Image (cartoon, coloured by chain):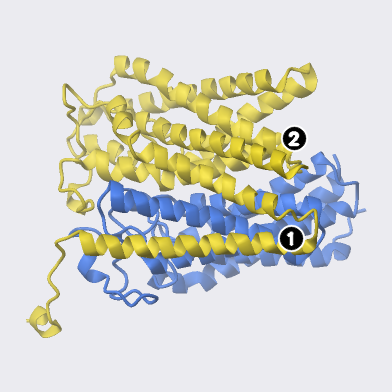
Amino acid sequence: MIDLAANFLWMFLVVIGGVLISWSVHFVPVGGAPAAMAQATGIGTGTVQLAAGAGLTGLISAGYMMQVVDNLPLILASGTVGAMIMISVTMIVGTWVYVYGVGCVPSSAKVKVDPITHDRQDLYVSQGTEGHGLPTVSFVSGVIGGALGGFGGSLVYYALLKVGMGVAEVDANMIGLVAIFAVGIFFVNAVIPSYNIGGTIEGFHDPKWKKWPKAVISSFVATIFCAIVAVIAILQLGGL
Amino acid sequence: MEPLIGMGVLALMGVAATIAGASEDLESDVGSQSNPNSQVQLAPQMMFPHRIYNKAVSGEPPSNALMCAIGATGAAVLMGEFNLSPLFALVIGALIAACVHGTYAMTSTMGRAASQSRFKQPVYLDMIRSHTPVIMAYAFITTFCVLIISYMMNVVLGHPFPLPLLAFIWGITIGAIGSSTGDVHYGAEREFQQFEFGSGLNASNSGNIVRFAESGLRNGYDNSWFCAKFGGPVTGIAFGMTVFLGSWITTVFDPAVSITRGWLSAVAGIIIVFILIIWNRKIEVAARNNYGPYKEDKPEEEAAA
């Protein structure tokens, strides 16, 4: 017997996690292919790729933490910190490459002054480009994005594992099933904001960032369906 | 677990991650993958036919995740069903992954080059024959090192995720890091060396990649030779730092001992992130002071006139 109502709280947490993941992607400064050619501000990779890289690294940390303690705030904190470390390390090494390898000065083309440091940006943008590298505001925005993504991913994993604990003993098969669903829900919610972002976004100071409610509402609806499918599958397959 | 053994395992994982990161980046430079490959693909259409391998199986994170998941699944089956020693199982798993990757690389480069025949892009069979084994070799090193990390996390550190899932997630992460860091060195510098250093890529120069080497036509070997000096090693450092720092905080402040230790590990992670934000700011200021010249700062009225 599949009892969805009994698992309403966990499904609600999955949906909250999905919405947070969707929101987090808007913070991650990605420049796509143009950034890889120092033609746009941000990290030179795709939106989904980097957000997923950071969030899933957080999932590894949260999974480890959940093995040893059963304390929700600590599990979420561990996922958040794992994702923050991954994204900040990637961004600092990205800055090394832009500054020492490519010779570009970090600069934003979307704002005239950096909202955090109040430094002029427009003077440093090279001709024919949309900025390059990672100015401080983009770096901080990326850290916030990583944190939200790691938090959301861990919340989804925690909630789904709790669903699984209700039907069977937790073993490697159960954890594998739950983690695959968490990864899948992460990807669904990382892809939806890409339509808002359209390849490049510099962070929370970018005008495109203001479009986030559209993506968040879409993710909310999509994650409800994902949560229903995930809960049914875990309840049915429980321990395989 | 004894703290010293934990630190030793962590050090080994960090070393394996550093090697994996470097080889992942060089693999994507020899074969030209990820975002910089958009220029390699664009070049023939802008009437710049070239002799550069053009694989781009997919974005780097999915292609590395595929490789690592195939390798880990193979290894898990060999260890579980055939009781093979982990060392042999991981090597054979990585070998299977490298063969699959080689197949993808070859079909995608041939397909891409052939589809650009109307732009007079030749299919260099000798280049494909010479480059594919190198791509497979780098793919083997990457997969093997990621499998070592995942195996040690799973067996020694007691991570609950199964081996193939851990390898899959680390594959996504290594691809995301490689395409964010080392590939920029290939895309923004090596492909466009004929333009002024530090000027970024003017949009009007898109597709005009360097096609001639010191001797003859430039190929993937020349690109990996150049990127091995900076892009590859820093990618290795990035992935090594991610794996090492991510596990270091929970090894030093073990949450299994007490909840307080667990919270200390989170605080330690946040301190590391703050240090990196400040470091980025220092590099930004130093670069602005040392580089240049920049645009003149014209008063607003003058600019309007």
Q: In the shown orientation, is residue B202 left or right of residue B60?
A: left
Q: Colour of chain B?
A: yellow
Quarter location, residue A150: bottom right
Locate residue B245, reporting x and y percent.
Answer: 58, 50
Q: In the shown orientation, is residue B295 left or right of residue A180?
A: left
Chain identifier for the blue-coloured part of the image: A
Q: Residue B78's mark?
A: none
* Residue placed under numbered mark 1 in the picture: B261
B175 and B42: which is toward the camera: B175
* Residue at the spot 62% in from the left edge and 39% down from the top edge: B168
Dot 2, crowdedness within 10 Å: few (<14), some or many (≥20)? few
Locate residue A226, reporting x and y percent.
Answer: 70, 56
Q: What chain is tagged by disc 1?
A: B
Tag 1: amino acid: Arg
Q: Quadrant of the N terminus of chain B?
A: top right
Q: Is residue B232 visible?
A: yes
Q: In the shown orientation, is residue B290 left or right of residue A169?
A: left
* Residue at the spot 31% in from the left edge and 73% down from the top edge: A111
**Disc 2 to disc 1, how far (Cα)?**
23 Å
Q: Residue B155's mark?
A: 2
Locate residue A31, reporting x and y percent.
Answer: 37, 56
* Residue at the spot 80% in from the left edge and 52% down from the top edge: A68
